Structures are given as structure tokens and as C-alpha cells.
Image: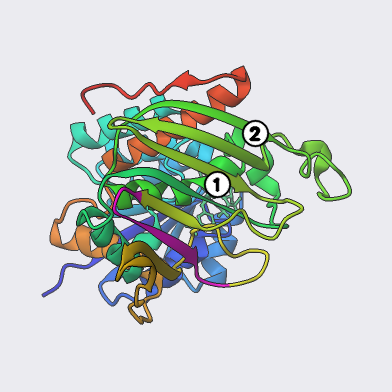
Amino acid sequence: MTKRLKIGIIGSGGIARFHVEAYQKLPYVDVVAVADVVPGRAQQFAENLGLTDAQTFDSHTEMLKLDLDGVSICTPNASHHRTSVDALRAGKQVLLEKPMSVTLNEALDMVKASRETGNMLTIGFQPRYDPNMKRLQEIVQSGRLGNVYYVETGGGRRRGMPGGTFIRKDLAGAGAMADIGCYSLDMALNTLGHPRPLTVSAFTSNHFGRNPLYHPEADRFEVEDFGVAMVRFENDLVLSFKISWAMHMDTLGATMFLGSDAGIKVTPFGTGPWSGVWDGSIGSMTMFHDDFGGHTETPIPLISHSVNLFQAKVHDFAEAVRDGRPAPIPAEQILIQQAIIDGVLRSAEQRREVSVELPHNV
Ligand SMILES: NC(=O)c1ccc[n+]([C@@H]2O[C@H](COP(=O)([O-])OP(=O)(O)OC[C@H]3O[C@@H](n4cnc5c(N)ncnc54)[C@H](O)[C@@H]3O)[C@@H](O)[C@H]2O)c1
């Protein structure tokens, strides 16, 4: 008989609903607890989602005293560190929402807690479940492009600035670079096979967020709404990475992988002002190469699929807990992008290139 899993939810805001709805599709999972720091919010959330038997709490530490198999952490970025370390040390398996953390030191501490306890910490990057992301990774890692020396990625919304917890430094830690930038970084780094970064030179701004013409909470807007960075890696590889929550432009361009033998241009699925930040599927892939005596462009056929990416990530976590499998998207892998985001924030503040401080033993 399949073991039933008892799952808890920490943070019952916008994205937590999607976690619960995905768990509710699994016959062997019960969502038995919800915690939120705003008194009454967890209770209301549980009622809205029909979690009639769930216990509710105003503090994650109280909830973690329960006998739970796993937790979904859906709190703002700055509390990812505390809540996940507490959950791991309380013996729970953890599915944590992106971005993993704000600072690199937090991320290192989280990986330490996972290693010391033997409990999994998996980070919820749902685009990894797009079969075409896997195809892109296979093509790039097959060596078909030759020596990959330059990658350009990122994404931009013409208008797509969040408010609330996302624009406060104490809660979000950072703005667009961490919120949606983490998706572009994950796509590029996972495709490349997690190369080691050396330096970052970055610039950030918030001309839109701080302007009441564009943001209703302009006086409370404390993070960046735009950022660009150049990241140097070992083996003469460079990444150019740009992100915007708002801009006077339609797009910041396609993602491209340039190699000595071929290049690939990739565009995201979807249209409209909120598309194109690599939080979903690939929309097109084209290879540029010299063949048949001239410049050739080959559209790479997309795998047609109906995978619900968000559900797939929650289900994969639940299955990994049930079957005792390792973390589907291990926190160790995400340390590299946290080191880059950490470097981006330091470089933008200091207005100069900085070294990436990733310890040698990770
Ligand atoms: N994967 C995705 O597609 C996706 C989409 C949106 C948001 N997210 C991520 O999910 C996280 C939450 O985003 P959201 O849109 O749900 O934010 P939100 O502000 O709507 O909800 C966050 C909730 O967490 C609660 N909270 C804060 N600190 C807490 C703590 N220590 N313990 C318990 N509860 C706490 C808040 O009171 C709030 O109810 C963010 O890190 C965000 O980047 C991911």
C-alpha cells in the first residue's frame, strides 16, 4: 500500500494556492497544516481551499513540531533561509519556492542544513519540467555548438511590476534580478551544465518603481526594477544577463548560446506584457550554422506536450519524498546562481566589477 504523506505549507499568499491545488490532485497526499505570520490568514486560506482538517498556525516553528513528511515554503524571499533551515532541522523534506535565498551566505547555510540532516532541499524552478528545456540542454551539452563562449539571456516585461512583499527590501531582499532573473539564470546555467562563475559587473535601477506615474506604491518601492550584468566564468565563457519589470521597450531580446561551430536562438512561449521571463516553456529554438555551402538556419522541432509545469514540480517533490529519491532540483546546484545574484547586488551597489565568492569546496 502506498504510504500517505503529510504535507505542511509555510506562507499562505499568492503562490501557496498553486502548491495546495497540485497536492490535492495526488491521492496519497494530505495537506494537514498551514502557517502564516499574519494572524488568521492561514485559517482563511485553509477554509478557501477546502482543507477542512488542516491545523493552522501563526508561526512556522509551531507548525514544524507536527509530524510532517514535507513542507512547501511559499514565503517572501528574505524568509526562505530561516524557514527552510528550521524545517530541515525539524526533520522535514523541503520544497522551497524560487529564488532560493537573497545572499550567498544564506544559501550556503541552507545547503549545510540539508547535508547535515540528510533531508532534501529542492528549489521550485518549474521550467525545468518543460521537455524542450531538456532538449535544449541535451543539444548544448552534446557538443554540437562546439566551444560555447557567449550566452545572452534575460527577460523583460514592458509593465509587470509586482507590489506588496515583492518591493520591500526587508521581505524580498532584491527586486527583478532575483524575482524573475533567477529563472533566466537557472535556464542558462542548467543548459550549460553549471559552470563556475568568477566575476560579475552589474548595474541596476528603479526609474519605474520609484515613479508614482508607473507604480501605486512608489513611495515604498525599495528594490531594482531593471538590471544588467556581465558574468565571467571559468574556461573563457561569458554570460550577459538583463532583466526588467518595466521598460519603454517591447522585449530585451532572445536568449542565445554562441558556440565556435553553431549558435542557438531561443524564445519563450507566449505573448503579451507578462510573457518572456523564462518562468514557463520554450516557444522556439533555431540553430544557426554554416552548412551546404552557406549560412544555414535550422528550426529545431519543439516537442509538443501538455505538461502543467507547476504541477509537475510539486508532484515530483511529493514522489521523491514518497520514494526516498534525492532532491529533484538540488539546492547545491542553485548555489551558483545565488553566488551570481549576490555578486550582482554587490557590484551594482559598489559600481564596479566584483569577484564571485563561491567557496572552492562547493
Ligand atoms: N514559481 C513561481 O511561479 C512563483 C510565482 C510567484 C511567486 N513565487 C515565489 O513564492 C514566494 C511567495 O510569493 P507570493 O506571491 O506567494 O507572495 P505573497 O506575498 O502573496 O505571500 C507570502 C505569504 O507569506 C507570509 N509569510 C511571510 N513570512 C512568513 C513566515 N516567516 N512564516 C510564515 N508565513 C510567512 C506572508 O504573510 C504572506 O501571506 C516568493 O519567494 C516568490 O518569489 C514563485
Q: Which region shows up in magenta?
A: 259-270
Magenta stretch holds residue 268: yes
Count residues near mark 1 (Cα–Cα under 10 Å), then give few for <14, some for 14-19, many for 20+. Answer: many
- Quarter that holds the N terminus: bottom left
User: In the orientation shown, which residue stands out farthest toward the left?
Assistant: 1
Residue 89 coordinates in the image, percent (x, y): 28, 35
Q: Are marks 1 and 2 in contact (CB under 8 Å)?
A: no
Return the residue nearer the eye: 91 or 108: 108
Label 1 sits on what residue type? Asp
Note whether ligand 1 is within 8 Å of mark 1: yes
| Residue at 31% in and 75% down | 26
Dominant SS type (magenta)? strand
The residue identified by callout 2 is 204
Q: Secondary structure at mark 1?
A: helix
Return the residue nearer the eye: 77 or 191: 191
Return the residue nearer the eye: 110 or 263: 263
Q: Which mark is residue 54?
A: none
Say above or below: 176 vs 134: above
Residue 36 coordinates in the image, percent (x, y): 53, 49
- Label 1 to label 2, Cα distance in Å? 14 Å
Left or right, 58 with reference to 166: left
Residue 136 appears in the figure: yes
Tell me where residue 64 sits by quadrant: top left
Label 2 sits on what residue type? Thr
| Residue at 44% in and 33% down | 231
The residue identified by callout 1 is 179
| Residue at 52% in and 59% down | 15
Say above or below: 163 vs 293: above
Of badges 1 and 2, nearer the viewer stands 2
